[in-house]
Amino acid sequence: MHVVSHKAIRIFCREHPDASNGLNRWYKVAKRATWASFVEVKQSCNTADFVAPYIVFDVGGNQYRLIAEINFRRQVLFIRSIMTHKEYGKGAWKS
């Protein structure tokens, strides 16, 4: 899977250094993945949820959320947002 873009992770980790391990672990898994459907995403990341049109990953022991769109045919994952659990709960990312 081609992940666009790791820069979003680096920027988020500057403000939230404790997120580094979880996000870097997630990045390694996603980069090596060859997911063909959400079912396959769920098999390797069991905390992932489909919230159309996004896939929401719980990262760092449920402290952070990574919002992504995946084009399975092209094997491209677009990071749309990374936020704390509290920010995610406010729902502003949906608009």
Image (tube, grey):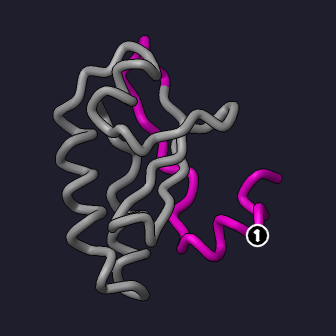
Q: Which residue bears the numbered disc 1?
A: 90
Name the kind of residue labelled 1 in the image.
Lys
Whether residue 32 sits left or right of residue 91 in the image: it is left
- Magenta span has 42? no
Residue 38 image point, x, y percent: 46, 22
Q: Secondary structure at mark 1?
A: helix
Q: Is residue 92 above or below residue 76?
A: below
The residue under the point 53% across, 46% down is 56
Task: Place residue 13 in its image quadrant.
Answer: bottom left
Task: Place residue 15 in its image quadrant.
Answer: bottom left
Residue numbers of the magenta segment: 71-95
Whether residue 26 sits left or right of residue 12 in the image: it is left
Q: Is residue 62 above or below residue 52?
A: below
Task: Place residue 84 in its image quadrant.
Answer: bottom right
Whether residue 89 sits left or right of residue 54 in the image: it is right
- Magenta span has 80? yes
